Each structure stands twice: as C-alpha cells, then as structure tokens.
Image: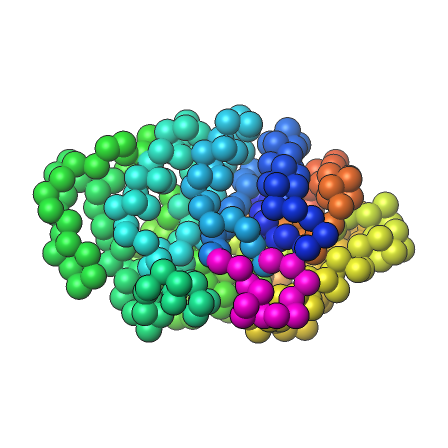
Amino acid sequence: MKFGTFHLMEQPFSKTEAQVYQEQMAQMRLADELGFDWVWLTEHHFSSVPHAPDVPGEYCVSASPFAMACAVSQITKNVRIGTAIKVLPLEHPLRTAEDVAMADIMSNGRIDFGVGLGYRQYEFDGLGVPIEEKQARFEEALKIVLGVWTTEEFSYDGQFWKVPRMTLVPRPIQKPHPPVWYATRLGTPTAIEFAANNDYRLLCAWAPRADLKLTYARMAEAHAARGRAGEPFDFTCLRHVFVGESDADAKKRGTEYIEYYMESTKFFRPIGDHERDEMIFGGPQTCIDKITSLGRETGVNNLICWMNFGGLPQDMVEASMRLFTDEVVPAVQKNLGANVLAV
C-alpha cells in the first residue's frame, strides 16, 4: 500500500490565509522527508460565507492547484504531486494544459493529473459556467488537454471550445503525459467504464467500504474484459488520519477537530456517518488495524491521508505524521504484503 497526504487548505477563522499556506507547505516538505508517496492538492473558488452564513471557516483557500504544485515542487525532492481534484469544466482546457505542463517541468516529472466534474453551484455561477453542462464540458476539456500534450500540431472543433491548429509550449516531461486520475465519490458503472476504457486511475474519495469493495470488483472485471485479468491496478480512497500516542490520547486531543470537520462540511455536501466511522483515528495499533482491514476488505492499495483536517494545530499534525510513518506504515506493509482482494 502507498500513502499520500491531502491538502484541502481549510481555513478556520482562527487562522489567517497566510498561516494556512505556511503550515501546509511545511507539512508537504515534511511528507517528502518522511517518505510519503504523494501530496495531493485541490481546487475551490470564492468565499463560502455568503452561501453558508453560519460556517466557522472557509472550506478551502486554494484556487489554483498547479500554482501550488509549482511551489511545492521547489521544496520537495521525491514525493509525487497530485490534484484531487482539478475541476476541468471551470476553465479553458488550454490554460489547464499549460499550467500542468509547467508544474510537471518544475517538478521534474512528478505531477499526477487528478480531474473531476465539480459540484458547487456558486463556483460555476461565479465563473459563468452552466453547471448542467459540466459532464459534457469535462469530457471535451480532457480530450483537448491530452490532445495538445501528445500531438505536435493539434486542432479541435467542439461544442464548447474551438482550438485552431497549434503546438502547445511547454509540454509535460512525462510521456505520453502525466498519469490521469478520475475522481468519483462512488464508483458507478459509468465512471468505472470510463476509467478502464482509457487506462485512467480511479480515485474514490470518501466512499464507504461496501461501495469500495463493489467498485474494486467492477474495476477488476473491466480490466479482465480488456485482457488484463490478474494485473494489479491503482485503487485509491481518502480517509481522515490522526495518530496519537494512544487511543485515549487521540480522543482527548483530536475529537474537537473531528467535530469541526463534521459540522463545517455539512454546509457543502452530504456527509454520512460512515465518514466518522471510517476515520483512521487512535493510537498506532488502532490505526494499523483499521488500515489493514480497509486494504483486506476493499482492495484499496493507495490511501490518501487527510492529516490536517479541522484546523488541527501544526505541532499535532506533524507529530501525527511522524507516528504514522514510524509505526503505522511499516506494520501495515508487513500485514498486507502484495494484497489483492479476491473477487
């Protein structure tokens, strides 16, 4: 199993925007030093306060994930830098293609291109994009991005964008292009077929275990139908992670930040009890047991760890990260080995 850290860039009103950036950049530098496989960035737009007047902070203050990726590339050496996610329908795909290419060059080929449709009405309204067009725009944008990355002279005549004959500069280091990750909260047959048909990697976010297991089985079937039965594939989900010295220590120091997350997030999307139940929260052994069972039951082999949720103080985040890599990761790797779920 591989592990990454997630950086939503929440801003409780007790912190300034600058403080959030400084803290999370330091966390990403530490993730690289500790041997995490990825850091994952994201994208949201505009203040949430007019749309959720009682919210205790901004949900996200990262509007440009590839500007952030360029910055992260300069303070890290080995960790891959992914987006979870870039909202493709919200901007011209040529701008997306340029930004990703620059980040890939500056990181020396460490970018993972995680993409999705988006879901917030006020973000689409603010940027003048009809939200009912998001699926069609997403598909067209992805064709254009991949086209200009891989074609010397590219042109396109679509429903939303027309691209005259051109050669994009710069283009990514990774060939034929950075890995594409397709984000879906639940692994629907349509999403699975789309990912499998195009050799994209699937990112399932907060899906509960039963849905993850079903998605894994469907992905395995889709790969088998394409003559790739038995071949391993990346299967990824996101979980909140906080490692304390013991279960009691984690509960005492971390509970208020879990409650902040649960209360603040409900303003923006449906949040199920499974999110609380599935948190990797406790002392090292409890976290080992939870991740081991997650891998064995669902086939998940890449875990995105949200370790800075709810405005957790910086010293608590860093201590949790160190306990995670020192005590949890080695035991999980020993427990799971080359785990492949039987389907």
Q: Tell me, what colour scheme is on the image?
A: rainbow
The picture places residue 241, in percent across and down from the top left corner, at: 70, 52
- Residue occupying the point 21% across, 46% down: 147
Determine whether, in the image, residue 150 is placed left or right of residue 119: left
- Left or right, 255 with reference to 272: right
The residue that appears at 21% across and 42% down in the rendered structure is: 148
Report the residue at 38% width, 67% height from top: 125
Magenta stretch contains residue 293: no
Asked if residue 47 lies in the magenta stretch, the reply is yes
Left or right, 207 with respect to 13, comes to left
Tag count: 0
Q: Nearer the viewer, residue 235 or 74?
A: 74
Residue that appears at 12% across and 56% down: 157
- 268 or 16, which is in the foreground? 16
Residue 193, given in percent of the width and then of the height, sits at 34, 64
Residue at the farthest left position:
165
Image position of 191 with respect to 112: above or below: below
Rendered location of residue 234, percent (x, y)? 47, 50
Look at the image and give the residue range highlighted in magenta: 46-58
| Quadrant in the picture for residue 110 | top left
Question: Magenta-highlighted stretch: main secondary structure?
Answer: loop
Q: Position of residue 298 (x, y in %)?
A: 58, 61
